[in-house]
Amino acid sequence: MNTIWIVLPILTLLMFELGLTLKPSDFKVFLSRPKPVIVGLTGQLILLPVLAWLVAWTFHLPPIFFIGFVLIACCPGGSSSNVFSMLAKGDVALSVSLTALSSLITLITVPVIMGVTTSYVGESVDVHLPVGKLIMQNLVLMFVPILLGLWVGHRFPVASSRMDSVLRKIAFPSILLLAGVFFLQNRTAIMENFGLLGLSVTVLILLAVGGGTLMSYMARLAGRERRTIVIEVGMQNAAQAIAIACSPFVFNNELIAVPAIIYALMMNVVLIVYVAIAARVKMTH
């Protein structure tokens, strides 16, 4: 079974579900509260890819994993970050706005950053980036489903609410199914490289949490905003990264997706611990 035929519908479904939850007002948070939005987007779109480059270079990751490592760092958020922000008693409105904006901005940033990355390390493993096909795939799998979800939510509010409640329950099991199938098909490569990739991924996630915290304190954001920024900077859209890695139109290489699977696993562990600590600290104040 080719993993791509599982990941493509899952990614499309997740983006449609994200569109259902959005309202035009979610895009206006930037106008009313620009500072936390700028801090969050800077952390998601600049800080994490830069950190990924530094960590991948420090750990001397093989070129094929170097590309995958930077790729997962270029794919922020997803609807799961909104759920984590809610559990951490964060600013859910800010989380939704960051997810919406970053999902659109990555249509531009992913091709740029991955173009630079493949130019830097891709030659040695004969990996090249077809930029036009990547942009087209992201438009079809992300931009169009989000717009469709927005339209359905505006045009049929009652029906969209029912659809959202169903899709929310399906979303996480779908990601688990994707991760499980991918793990089974690539278990040898994953197990052989789990030590190196597991350590480097964990370091990256901890740096993301630390960097998000530091940026939030420097910007003097409120506690709810700080918790949201940390989660938004740390959480990545593994489905998007796997879709780009495995797509026959882009990289067509499942090894490039291995860092995304490991990141998805470690990300949930680290951020569940963070949410628990954040909730405990909040309760004691």
Image (spheres, grey):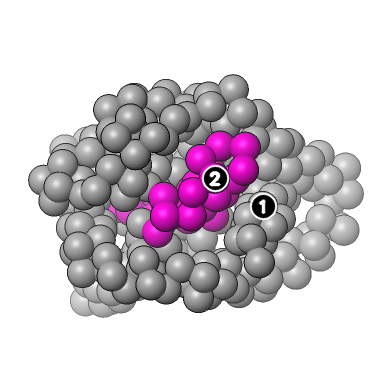
Visible in this render: residue 206?
no
Check the picture and name the quadrant holding the N terminus.
bottom right
Q: What residue type is labelled 2?
A: Asn
Pick whichever, 11 or 5, lies toward us: 5
Residue 162 spot, x, y in % from top left: 81, 65
Q: Mark 2 points at which residue?
A: 252
Q: Name the residue under label 1.
A: 8
Q: Which mark is residue 257?
A: none
**Residue 137 image-quadrant placement:** top right
Q: Is residue 258 above or below residue 112?
A: below
Residue 31 spot, x, y in % from top left: 49, 26
Cα distance in 3D space between marks 1 and 2 = 13 Å
Rendered residue at 87%/58% (across/down): 159
Residue 279 spot, x, y in % from top left: 31, 73
Q: In screen coordinates, is 76 left or right of 104?
A: left
Pick whichever, 152 or 225, lies toward us: 152
Rendered residue at 88%/42% (across/down): 155
Give the number of the mark in front: 1 or 2: 2
Magenta range is 230-258
- Asked if residue 237 is among those painted magenta in the image, a careful observer would answer yes
Does dot 1 land on a helix, a strand or a loop?
helix
Rendered residue at 16%/41% (across/down): 57
Q: What residue type is labelled 1?
A: Leu
